[in-house]
Amino acid sequence: MKAVIITVGNEILKGRTVNTNFSYLGELLTYSGYDVVKGIIVRDNLNEISEAFREAFSTGDLIVSSGGLGPTYDDMTLDGFSRCFGLKLTKNPYAVDMILKKTGYMTPAREKMSLLPEGSEPLENRAGTAPGVYMEMSGKIIIIVPGVPGEVKSIMEGIKNRIKIKGFHYTDRSEDLHGVKESLIAPLIAELMKKYGDNAYIKTHPKIDDNGSPWVEVEVSSWGNNEEEIEKFADSILEQIKENAMQNNYK
Amino acid sequence: MKAVIITVGNEILKGRTVNTNFSYLGELLTYSGYDVVKGIIVRDNLNEISEAFREAFSTGDLIVSSGGLGPTYDDMTLDGFSRCFGLKLTKNPYAVDMILKKTGYMTPAREKMSLLPEGSEPLENRAGTAPGVYMEMSGKIIIIVPGVPGEVKSIMEGIKNRIKIKGFHYTDRSEDLHGVKESLIAPLIAELMKKYGDNAYIKTHPKIDDNGSPWVEVEVSSWGNNEEEIEKFADSILEQIKENAMQNNYK
């Protein structure tokens, strides 16, 4: 199952804000059983948001979008999403309840946050005012959350058991190989990936120590239905790399 | 002039690595005079990388891609780029020189890093081995750099004066408005954006303090050819917002 993550917000594109929502969502979806195959970052612009959903929908089985769900003029993610699929935004009574419980009274800006795409379901946001949005369409799941990291986490915590692919397990471990140069260990990694690549993934992350000497972090991940087996499998691959690195001189 | 940023790397999509290269590049390009209009994050996959460049080229005047430029089997950004535009990868003598100066001798994995798209120019990488790549095509600029943040910065520092749009200035300031709720200040911001939106941009960033009370950071940016004028313009807008927030009760 493929997942696509959309981020909406000029502040991300201008580099003013580091996209920690993306890494949080990427990790959550990976451990939930999805291949996160693409990220799309767009401006607070109606057409561009609409186009991002169209693009994501053509690829992903699950789409999560963060940002642009607040009360201000430039929060237009739900508008863009609705435009993409020809849906109307209608006042959602559950969303109204959630907002009133938080704030006590309505204002025009808060009314805006209670307008949800028809057929969608509001998701509780314990860390802020704007509810998240959950929707199923053509067998695909779309989740839309605000951009404030605490709110993203609060909403996703509430929904994560519903989206987790049953019986799926993912594991990931890594080892620092000090004194090992990435370009010298590269052929070994390529060979192991040929052998094990269907059920595991090996990646080297080149680093430089304080003295300017290169070293690599080796990451091994594996996935499948049997938790014990994939843990053992990933361990055994990492062990082979460590042994090989010790036997050879990769400096 | 529009810019598009591509990030290549499974580790970003899986949320293992926070995409700080993106925020660094976004800020650099914004201050260099570009509208960063889109970000595309793809896996270490030949077709998906190629498709990302095709997509970026259809929108951007400047494209910067980071990641996938090293010696390992899954570093395939230059392959993907070349496939997209029907270019050959050929051994670049300047790139060979750069790599030899760094490492002293060639290996097959290092040879790989000296293969550049025909017609491109290697960019010096003082922080690592793989040279960056600079290319002009149909009046557009393409820059390809590795994924290690120190290497991205080293290469971009060397090229930034060449890509800066002459005479362009950008400024950005912000103010914390404690005790102000975003949904209550939203109508004022919308009104000011209608008035000044052609040459300025106002964005509110909702925050929550330690006691759980909401407040907003207001950001005002402006751009143009006259540095002094845009600074004054941004100041005056921020001043209006502060005064208005003090006069009214936005709590």
Image (cartoon, coloured by chain):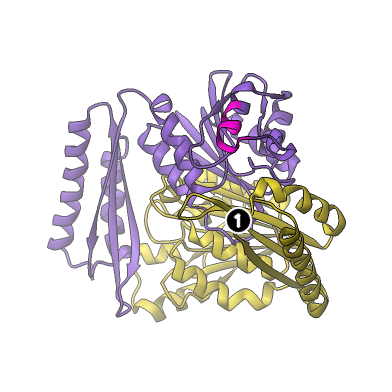
Chain colours: A purple, B yellow
Q: Residue at x 76, y 53 (%)?
A: B189
- Residue B197: percent from the left, percent from the top? 82, 57
Camera sees residue B143: no
Q: Nearer the viewer, residue B219 or B135?
A: B219
Chain letter for the residue marked with disc 1 in the picture: B
Quarter of the image for residue A134 reads top right
Left or right, B72 with reference to A101: left
Left or right, A249 with reference to A9: left
- Residue B212: percent from the left, percent from the top? 49, 49
- Residue B80: percent from the left, percent from the top? 54, 50
Q: Nearer the viewer, residue B87 or B41?
A: B41
Camera sees residue A74: yes
Q: Which residue is mark 1?
A: B179
Q: Residue at x 12, y 61 (%)?
A: A247
SS under mark 1 = loop
Q: From which residue to which does the magenta span run?
A: A97-104
Vertical placement of residue A51 versus A61, above or below = below
* The C terminus of chain A: image quadrant: bottom left
